[in-house]
Amino acid sequence: MYDYLIVGAGLYGAVFAHEMKQKGKTCLIIEKRDHIAGNVYTALENGIHVHKYGAHIFHTNDRKVWNFITQFAEFNRYTNSPVANYKGEIYNLPFNMNTFSKMWGIFTPEEARAKIEEQKMKALSDLAGVTPEDSPGEAKRKMDAFEPANLEEQAISLIGTDIYEKLINGYTQKQWGRPCTELPSFIIKRLPVRFIYDNNYFNALFQGIPTGGYTQMVEKLLEGIEVRLSVDYLEEVKKKKAEGCESPQTLGLAKKVVYTGPIDAYFGYSLGALQYRSVRFDTETLDMDNFQGNAVVNYTDAETPFTRIIEHKHFEFAQRYHEDGSLFNEEENAADPKTIISREYSAEWKQGDEPYYPVNDDANNALYEKYKALAEKEENVIFGGRLGEYKYYDMDQVIKVALEKAEKEG
């Protein structure tokens, strides 16, 4: 009899299990997939650590989280600096002076502010229905009273038309699978605009990629903890119920369950299915040293079917690794050049797909609250993580909430 049966070997489950082991508790982890590490799983292919479920770049301002996770991996100094490709035009992200200089041929923050303000005021005037016949006072009244009805109106009222059309509209449409005019305005509450020449996307105090990949980091978290792979928890619960088990949720194996799967699936979608966005990856190995010159390139036009291309080796500064962790030398790289890219296609989630991003609109959040109420009635079951809490967590946030939950349990 274990103290905890943990469903899912991703970051939340691994951190929680590690902490409870430190407190003298016994844990069993079961995982539906055939590998640990959840969506941060990396696999070594042709000497390159491939992010099998999309780019994962660790960043945090939380020193406690940083001090915790760096016990299990040494992090490199990778800084997320994606670029956008709009019909062959290349722009830096996030929006900064490099972006504005390329787009408008300007060079100073004053010029950039003036250009953005000019476009914002023009957009607001048009959206608010201001006419040439309106007095200045009437025009201001209309603009002050204007409320964006959708994401498009929200975005152009914040940043103007040029940046919206080239860097937001097509990309967002592909991400969400519908035009920006059909998306709620709250999705973009603000847009990060920097009037400095700085391409550091996260601008976090601590940032990097684990040397050796995320899988190796999670392996160290799970040292001494039993893990069973390729076990479908919900199917096992069904079997236990059919057998008349007194405690089917724990599978008769533990005192408590920590469940990190989809909360609606746990309850058999009894109240309806929560919505997610899913992602499909088209990964290709190329016989060349360097495909795009950057780890992440976003394709922001609507016509290109994929949202971005990841070139995995650039997360580790184009280094390649042997199985024993040693680096390829120059001769080895030259004799057999390789790079691996993944094209990402955003898709509407359906049952059987991997859920990635919760669609946290009003309707889905209201449905989640109903499931949460059911969850609170479940005895000896803890719901945690991105799917268990139907919340978009960054990695550092997952670690933080897992640490906090483990502390309360201890």
Image (cartoon, grey):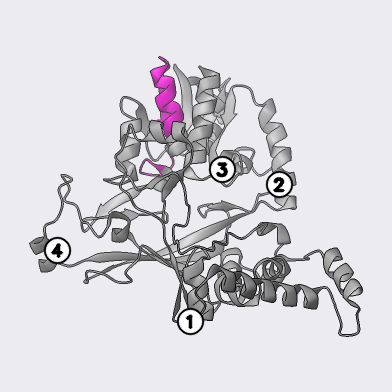
Report helix, strand or loop for mark 4.
Answer: helix
* Residue 77 placement, left or right of 11: left
Residue interval drawn in magenta: 14-37
Question: Image height check: is 277 above or below 98?
Answer: above
Residue at the disc numbered 2: 365
Residue at the disc numbered 3: 387
Residue at the disc numbered 4: 333
Image quarter of the N terminus: top left
User: CA gap, disc 3 to disc 1?
Assistant: 35 Å
Residue at the disc numbered 1: 87
**Which amino acid, mark 4?**
Asn
Closest to the observer, 52 or 75: 75
- Mark 2 or mark 3, which has the lower sequence index? 2
**Which amino acid, mark 3?**
Leu
The image position of residue 187, as x and y in percent, is 67, 58
* Residue 67 placement, left or right of 251: left
